Image (spheres, grey):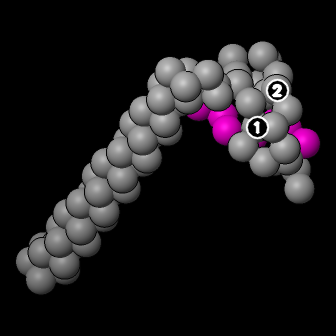
Amino acid sequence: ILDQARVGRLSRMDALQAQQMAQETARRRQVQLQRIDSALRRMETGDYGYCFICGDEISSARLDFDPASTRCIGCMDK
């Protein structure tokens, strides 16, 4: 026999979990768009590819991996 109350609770829990996952995905997407927009602005001003902390160049390998990087590997490790 199917316990309708239990199935209803599980369905609500699944729906809430799916909603939370969708909200987190949207939040991460928004953060990524902000990082990309910031990188484009740095390109326009000539600041792209330089560390925000120490001012040194960010390695091309790091920028290849994450073009929106704002810190060199040395400053990221600190």
Q: Are marks 1 and 2 in contact (CB under 8 Å)?
A: yes
Instruction: Verify whether residue 37 appears in magenta.
Output: no
Rendering quarter of residue 71: top right
Q: Quadrant of the N terminus?
A: bottom left
Give the Cα distance between marks 1 and 2: 6 Å
Which residue is found at the position 24% from the left and 68% from the top?
A: 16
* Label 2 secondary element: loop
Query: In the image, what residue type sits under mark 2?
Result: Glu
* Residue toward you, 46 or 36: 46
- Assign the magenta stretch its main secondary structure: loop
Residues shaded magenta? 68-74
Farthest residue in the bottom direction? 5
> In which quadrant of the rendered image does the C terminus lie?
bottom right
Number of numbered discs overlaid on the protein picture? 2
Determine whether 64 is above or below 41 in the image.
Answer: above
Q: Which mark is residue 39?
A: none
- Residue 68, how many percent across, how many down? 59, 31
The crowding category of the residue bearing disc 1, from other C-alpha atoms within 10 Å (few below 14, some 14 to 19, many at least 20), is many
Label 1: which secondary element = loop
Q: Which mark is residue 51?
A: 1
Residue highlighted by disc 2: 57
Mark 2: few/some/many CA within 10 Å (<14, 14-19, 20+): some
29 vs 5, nearest the viewer = 29
Q: Is residue 10 left or right of residue 74?
A: left
The vertical placement of 78 against 12, above or below, is: above
Q: Quadrant of residue 52?
A: top right
